[in-house]
Amino acid sequence: MSVVDAVRPRAHLVLGAIRLINGAGALLVPSLPARRFGVDHPEVRVSLSEGEPEEAVERLKRGDFDIALAFDFELYPFEEDRDIVYTHLLEERMHVALPPDHPLGDRKSIRLEELSGERWLCGSGETSCRQLTLKSCERAGFTPDVAYESNDYTVMLALVEAGMGVTLVPDLALMIPSPDVPMLEIEPVAPTRRVWALSLGAGSRSGATDAMIETLREVSAEILPAARPALAA
């Protein structure tokens, strides 16, 4: 996760953020917001720390982070927590990634049930990424045959490109160079991934925290338009 510490003698903001994706999509965390925030607020020192989605809330409450950048899914949302303020940053559509020689690879869109006989790749353990794939397939009327597990979209796309199966990827993963992997829209409604800035209530956070949240909003508004043209290319 990436973390932004709060105000101390020289204000120090700790931003804790899970890895949204590897490769180019990691631009959201930490480089773009940290760089922009540093230009606008040079008096505040920004620290970054990476962690797992499942630890975000507890580490925020312990004071490890001032802000936790995390994601959930429409089909597998965060549990309500009255001590946490959830600031919505962006919403990504999920897409299907197919092997280069897949017979349906020349299409623009697909229904998940058309892939019920395929081998699938998904997140490992009991992560929200894994649950999204399982629940999306179940909603389409089948249980996926999961052959490979990884929480790294770079690894999953490499396996798809090698013909090892199909998987779901979010908009930001479209920025990972994989020109031979067909990326199809999901019909009739694509599952979505939601990215949030988690912070404590207003009385428990610094002005530096509020300023970083605004910077995260600005960067989030810019990054999806940079990712989605890759789908249409």
Image (tube, rainbow, N blue to C red):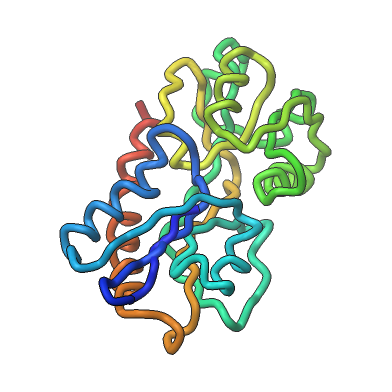
Give the vertical position of 151 relative to 43 (above or below): above
Left of 124 or right of it: where is 73? left
Q: Where, quadrant-wise, is the C terminus in this rendering?
A: top left
Left of 69 or right of it: where is 83? right
Residue positioned most to the top: 101
At a point 69% along the width and 30% down the height, the residue shown is: 121
Q: Nearer the viewer, residue 138 or 45?
A: 45
Query: Where residue 19 sits: x, y (%)?
Result: 50, 45
Give the vertical position of 195 relative to 223 (above or below): below
Query: Where residue 132 sits: x, y (%)?
Result: 68, 48
Q: Nearer the viewer, residue 80 or 206?
A: 206
Give the vertical position of 130 relative to 109 (above or below): below
Give the vertical position of 187 relative to 86 (above or below): above
Left of 125 or right of it: where is 66? left
At a point 76% along the width and 43% down the height, the residue shown is: 125
Residue positioned most to the bottom: 203
At a point 80% along the width and 43% down the height, the residue shown is: 141
Residue 160 in which image quadrant? top right
Q: Nearer the viewer, residue 12 or 167?
A: 12
Query: Where residue 177 sits: x, y (%)?
Result: 41, 24
Residue 42 in which image quadrant? bottom left
At a point 28% along the width and 60% down the height, the residue shown is: 218
Count numbered badges in the picture. 0
Residue 66 in which image quadrant? bottom left
